[in-house]
Image (spheres, grey):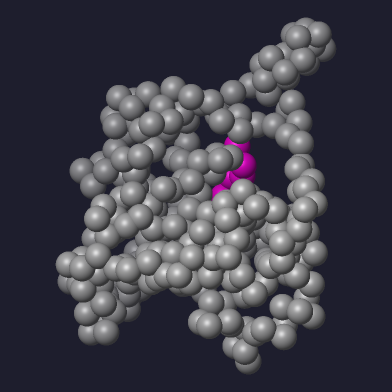
Amino acid sequence: MPLRQLCQHQNRLGQWPLTEQVRRTVQALPGFRTLFHSLRSHTRAPGLGNPSAFVVGQMVRVKDRAAIENTLDEKGRLRGLQWMEPQWSYCGTIQRVSKQVRRIMEKSGVIRSPAGTVILENVTCAGISGTVGCGRACALFFRDDWLEATNEEARDIPYQANTRHATVRSVADIRATLDAGGGRDGLMFMPEMAQFADRRFPILKTIDSVQEACSTRLPRAHWYVLRGLQCSGAVLGRRGPCHSSCGLIWHPDWLRLVDRRLVARETDPSITPSTA
């Protein structure tokens, strides 16, 4: 029995031939152990993992490579949490704690309760270059062991006036694009996304490729991730929230792209239409 998809992280974004879709769907059917844990998580509110020693808003430094390697086992993990390749690019940088991670839902539907773990502000699997990772710009998890407190401030990268922006369409316009399952081209429109309707946001990135089932695929549509818009995890209801803070993914039919020249004129009134 396939499990109900609760969030966009469980949506398949890449292009897959029909035969491959059928084969992988059969392979993805939950085994007894996964099904048992998933059904149990539907009937019992999971506990929270122990809190991190770092509080939200605190400045931290990501330790250097040698210090982190000393904490990892032969599989590159610390207490079961994998250190991801894009995380190396953040070693030595100053970051701000965005959220404590004490409960997460995996793509299988299993809910875990990590301890001593945080998410850092705007630190994703895309890395500092913005070009690596799975394509979804997922938040990276950091064990307390990989961080140290600091009084230094992070160096924010200023967004230029020509940064691309998009306006989220009205709820009525978006609902008119949805199929019977509440999605578009396989992408779920999550209920909490409605709160951003009729508002404009910078575009963090477009998803040009996506890694799914150990394979890199072209996206089924020209997906967008908007800066600062992340899943709250409230979709889990009494079993949540999930603290993964995945970036919300937007179908192009749910957005109106804003002309860069318009944004530039709003940022600098001295710019005229002829010079923008």
Q: Quadrant of residue 129?
A: bottom right
Where is 255 relative to 237, above or below?
Answer: above
Does the stretch in magenta take in 204? yes
Q: Nearer the viewer, residue 36 or 118?
A: 118
How far across and down, in percent of the image, does residue 50 sit?
45, 70
Write the start and end of the magenta stretch as one range.
203-209
Q: Going 57% across and 77% down the picture, which residue do you hit?
A: 82
Does the stretch in magenta take in 18? no
Q: Going 78% across and 48% down the picture, which residue do you hit?
A: 153
Q: Nearer the viewer, residue 18 or 247?
A: 247
Q: Quadrant of residue 206?
A: top right
Q: Going 72% across and 82% down the picture, which residue do you hit?
A: 69
Left or right: 233 in relation to 115? left
How far across and down, in percent of the image, does residue 276 sit?
78, 15
Q: Quadrant of the N terminus?
A: bottom left
Where is 2 relative to 206, above or below?
Answer: below
Where is 230 relative to 256, above or below?
Answer: below
Left or right: 268 in relation to 101? right
Q: Is residue 95 visible?
A: yes
